[in-house]
Amino acid sequence: MAKKKTVYICSECGYQSGRWLGKCPSCGGWNTFTEEVEVPQVKTKSRNVLNFLSSNSKPIPITQAEEVEYIRFPSGIKVFDNALGGGLVKGQVALIAGEPGIGKSTLLLQLSHSLAGEGKKVLYISGEESVNQIYLRAKRLGALSDNLVVFSETLLERIEEVAEELKPDILILDSVQTVFSGELESSAGSVSQVREVTYRITEFAKRNDATAFVVGHVNKEGQIAGPKVLEHIVDTVLQFEGERGSFYRILKVVKNRFGPSGEVAVFKMTSFGLEEIPEPSAFFISERNADRAGTVVFPYTEGTKPVLLEVQALVLPSVYATPQRRSEGFNPNRLNLILAVLEKEANIFLRDKDVFVNIVGGMEVDEPGIDAAVALAIASSAKNKPIPPDVAVFGELGLTGELRNVYFAEARVKEAERFGFNRILTPKSVAQELQNPKVEGYSHIRELLEAVI
């Protein structure tokens, strides 16, 4: 009989230790270690997943490898398909994560109904709701279909039996933290259970050419809960976000092995479910008050399709000994860098001012191309001079005030032009390359500010 061993595992990143630690040396999380019983030689089905994927593989020159064309099929929700690069793929495993109550189950039920209407057999497994609860939700959403089979279960082995019997085209598991394997001694939601469940759902999907969706929880920082291996196992990682008091929801593609990452899909939550918003750019800038100081439009891109975002800044005299610097959707360390550059290179002194920056719509932007937009919005608010409404701007800001080129410049310009922006302020190298009369190039932040405000 295998000797049992007690280990301590970080619930945030999966780091293992022989003793309890207050702070995880891997991810830095505090009080995240949980005690689990490890049986080193226990044989579980997940041990064979990677072997299954590579059982017939032999080392060959890369020039002799065969090109495999993945056939996509539509989900029936257009903005969802566009975000995933054109639709779903057989054998694809997607993780969708979001805060409780944000609408993950609603999205997946609507997706199930749409796919069932396309003739796909859908198996919806819930470890959080009873069949009656799922029925009532589906009835409210108008998502009832004979091709949609619902099942309430938390034991992984029973789920596997039903899945093998039904052979669904689409398998949905809601959620991975509520399901457990009887072959492991740890409780549902533990690191080892989450890893085991994900491995075995992935194995089923790959072996049967089924598309699988796995729902995951998020921690208090908004990151996907559980070990990082969870994100590595699946093919696609989707983050479903939105403010509790807002009607709008944003689906972000964080990872996608079958298409570009960084794409977004926008929905509106109604009493009848989620409605598609086909034009994200129009949504993000629709309520912009362009005649006020401190607001400017920035063409953001991380995937293939740019999205116009509104960047807002508010500068006012500080009543505190230490002025406040706050940002929503933008790195606060990057904000401090921009403030330092504005003071040194543009003579805009903000050391006794409170500065607030907001990316409207709840978007999180971590690309340097937004630097010029943030700097311009701050300068506009500080001087109380509105930016002309037909201006859009992008470019990375260096420590000496220079404006640097960013990727997908031409696509950003085209998106801004499509929405009627006639002055697109960019780094000088972009203007020289594109030779577009609507594009104005500047080599330094001081020149850009003088031209606008």
Image (spheres, rainbow, N blue to C red):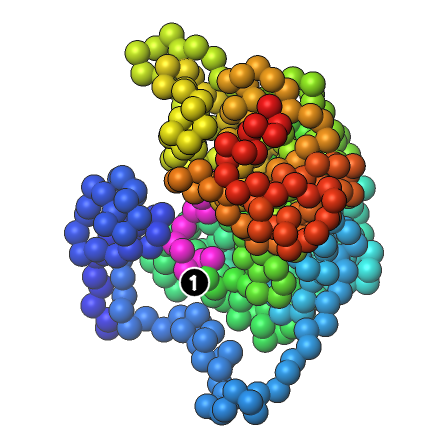
Residue 22 in which image quadrant: top left
**Element class at badge 1:** helix
Q: Position of residue 275 (x, y in %)?
A: 76, 39
Q: In the image, is residue 230 part of the stretch drawn in magenta?
A: yes
- Residue depicted at x 69% and y 22%: 290
- Taking depth in this image into account, of 228 and 17 the one nearest to the observer is 228
Task: Decide if residue 442 is in sight here.
Answer: yes
Range of residues picked out in magenta: 220-231
- Residue depicted at x 47% and y 42%: 402
Prevailing secondary structure of the magenta residues? loop
Task: Decide if residue 266 is in sight here.
Answer: no
Q: In the image, is residue 367 part of the stretch drawn in magenta?
A: no
Total count of labels: 1
As displayed, is residue 104 above or below residue 160? above
Which quarter of the figure is the N terminus placed in?
bottom left
Q: Position of residue 152 (x, y in %)?
A: 60, 50
Q: Position of residue 288 (x, y in %)?
A: 69, 25
Residue 416 in which image quadrant: top right
**Residue underneath mark 1:** 196
- Taking depth in this image into account, of 187 and 114 the one nearest to the observer is 114
- Residue depicted at x 42% and y 31%: 345
Q: Position of residue 274 (x, y in %)?
A: 73, 39
